[in-house]
Every structure is written in structure tokens, then in C-alpha cells.
Amino acid sequence: MSDEITLTLPREPNFHRVAHLVLGGLAVRLDLTVESLEDLQIALDSILDRTEAKAGDVTVRMRVSEGELETLVGPLTRRLLDEIEREPDGELGIRRVLESTVDDVHVDGEWVRLTKKVAVVRG
């Protein structure tokens, strides 16, 4: 099973809430914990807050597949992508925030891919 939702939003902060609502709906569908949802929202906001409003729209693609929720964000500026790729050197930069909130961070061209794995709860 793999489902995908694609949002194209203006980069203004007021539109981040739309991405949060969709992310919340997917989290419920996957039985993610509140903590996991909050982690995803923090990771997404860490990227969206650093985008430049004058750069046009930003696309957020959320894909649900077996055991994970993958979020792609882009296109992003080279400056932001460089910041995401930079290894943390003791400072609380965007890379450290992303690594502490999602299971995998990967830059692919002008996009960043965030993956959150879903723990399977067996009863």
C-alpha cells in the first residue's frame, strides 16, 4: 500500500497550518503517536520557516507506505540545502533538528526527503 498527497503552497508561514492538517490526518491513519506527529511537524516547520517567501510556491509531498511516512519538500534554495547537508558541529542547526525528529534526512537535487518510520504495535 502506498498513498501520496501533494500540496503546493505559498511560502508564507500562514500556509504551514495546511501542511500540518494533512500531516495530522496521515498520522492518524498510521496510528502515529502524538510525539511522532509533533516531531514531523517540527521537522517540516524547520524547513518551511527557512524558505524565502519571494521564491514562489513550495511543494510538500507526503507518501504513506508500509511502515513509514515520507515527506518531500522543495524546491529549496541551494543555500538552504547546503545548510541541511552540513554536518552539525556542536551547534543546534537545522541538520541536528532534522536528525533528532525524523529517522532519515536525505537531500535529492532541490528537494529534501524526511522519513519517519512507524513502530508496529502488536497486541
Image: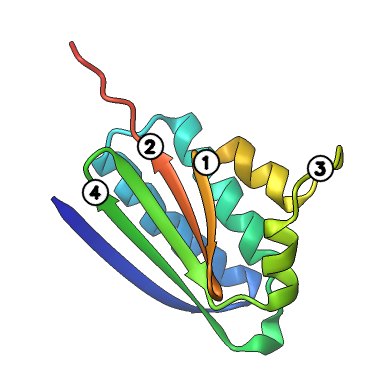
What's the residue type where badge 3 is placed? Leu
Question: Contact (CB < 8 A) between labels 4 and 3?
Answer: no
What's the CA distance linking mark 2 and mark 4? 10 Å
Q: Nearer the viewer, residue 60 or 9?
A: 60
Residue bearing mark 4: 65
What's the residue type where badge 2 is placed? Lys
What's the residue type where badge 1 is placed? Val
Q: Is residue 50 visible?
A: no
What's the CA distance linking mark 3 and mark 1? 15 Å
The image's mark for residue 117 is 2
Q: Quadrant of the C terminus?
A: top left
Q: SS of the residue at dot 2? A: strand
What's the CA distance linking mark 4 and mark 3? 31 Å
Question: Contact (CB < 8 A) between labels 3 and 1?
Answer: no
Q: Residue furthest left?
A: 1
Number of marks present in the image shown: 4
Question: Contact (CB < 8 A) between labels 4 and 1?
Answer: no
What's the residue type where badge 4 is placed? Ser
Residue appearing at x 35%, y 47% in the figure: 69
Residue bearing mark 1: 102
Tell me the crowding category of disc 2: few under 14, some 14 to 19, or many 20 or more residues within 10 angstroms, Cα based.
some
